[in-house]
């Protein structure tokens, strides 16, 4: 069955960096677009970034552009999110999600990993 | 950026009755070349990740009960839950994937009256 397992979350000070990972299994990872979506405590969903199946395109929300970098390793079935210059407002549960089409919905989601930015 | 709005913010419906959630996009999200609306609906229960229930505005995902239906085109969309069941209590989000950033609506909380 499809599994997406995020890791790498934790408590980090403002201005520092963190890298999230998402291990995928149960589907052909290299054929799917991959997203990061976050949810601040008791708030709604915020789309963060997407990377095409072949890494040919990457797009970001304005709130993270220039600070976050999405990447993937298709040989390892793993998605990454490098988060630099973290701010308190980046505190959220970060979900990875898979979509069959580059411009399409996210059909499969992980359970999420919590990132807390605090001094 | 395309801004997604939803109404109402929350609603309470009696078991077996109908729940209707509206979603509006600030721009047209109907792609003329394939006549598809680039809109999804997600259900999120407490402590769980979102679950895709409707894609392309009206296509129910596999395993989703047929009491869930999506409609609308262009800029105005509706999610209808007929015969509301206790397990349908959740927050529902619409999302456009017509243009990046792929923005979500603010969510609508559905409860039992």
Image (spheres, coloured by chain):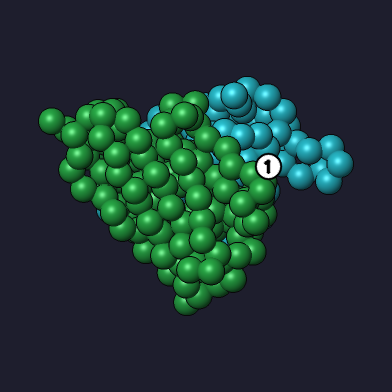
Q: Nearer the viewer, residue A100 or B83?
A: A100
Nearer to me, A100 or B37: A100
User: Residue A79: x and y, percent?
Assistant: 46, 57
Q: Nearer the viewer, residue B70 or B81?
A: B70
**Position of residue B63 measured from the top left corner of the image (x, y, whole percent):** 54, 68
Q: Is residue B51 visible?
A: no
Identify the residue at horizontal 57%, vertical 33% (top origin).
B101
Residue A87 placement, left or right of B33:
left
Residue A22 can be seen in this image: yes
Q: Position of residue A44 (x, y in %)?
A: 38, 36
How crowded is the residue under tag 1: few (<14 C-alpha within 10 Å), some, or many (20+)? many
- Outermost residue toward the left in this view: A119
Residue position marked by numbered label 1 in the rendering: B38
What residue is shown at x 41% (from left), y 32% (from top)?
A67
Query: Does residue B66 appear left or right of residue A3 in this picture?
Result: right
A103 versus A53 height, above or below? above
Viewport quadrant of the C terminus of chain B: top left
Chain letter for mark 1, please.
Answer: B
The colour with which the image depicts chain A is green
Q: Is residue A14 left or right of residue A67?
A: left
- In which quadrant of the rendered view does residue B48 lie? bottom left
A37 and A62: which is toward the camera: A62
Mark 1 falls on what kind of element? loop
Residue at figure coordinates x 26%, y 29% from the top left: A15
Residue lying farthest to the right in this orientation: B33
**Vertical placement of residue B101 versus A57, above or below:** above
Q: Chain B colour?
A: cyan
Image x and y of residue A100, in percent: 63, 59
């Amino acid at each position: 069955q499809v599994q997406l397992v995020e890791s790498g979350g934790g408590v980090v000070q403002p201005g520092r960096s963190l890298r999230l990972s998402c291990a995928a299994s149960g589907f052909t990872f290299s054929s799917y677009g991959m997203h990061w979506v976050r949810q601040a405590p008791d708030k709604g969903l915020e789309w963060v970034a997407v990377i095409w199946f072949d890494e040919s395109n990457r797009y970001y929300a304005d709130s993270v552009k220039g600070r976050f970098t999405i990447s993937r390793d298709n040989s390892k079935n793993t998605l990454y999110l490098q988060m630099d210059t973290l701010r308190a407002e980046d505190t959220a549960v970060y979900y990875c999600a898979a979509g069959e089409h580059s411009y399409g919905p996210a059909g499969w989601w992980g359970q999420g990993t919590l990132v807390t930015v605090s001094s | 950026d395309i801004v997604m709005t939803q109404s109402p913010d929350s609603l309470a419906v009696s078991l077996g009755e109908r729940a209707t959630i509206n979603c509006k996009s600030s721009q047209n999200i109907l792609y003329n070349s394939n006549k598809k609306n680039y809109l999804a609906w997600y259900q999120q229960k407490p402590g769980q990740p979102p679950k895709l229930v409707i894609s392309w505005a009206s296509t129910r995902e596999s395993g989703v009960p047929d009491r869930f239906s999506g409609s609308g085109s262009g800029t105005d969309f509706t999610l209808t839950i007929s015969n509301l069941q206790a397990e349908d209590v959740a927050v529902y989000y619409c999302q456009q994937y017509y243009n990046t950033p792929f923005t979500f609506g603010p969510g609508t909380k559905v409860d039992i009256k």
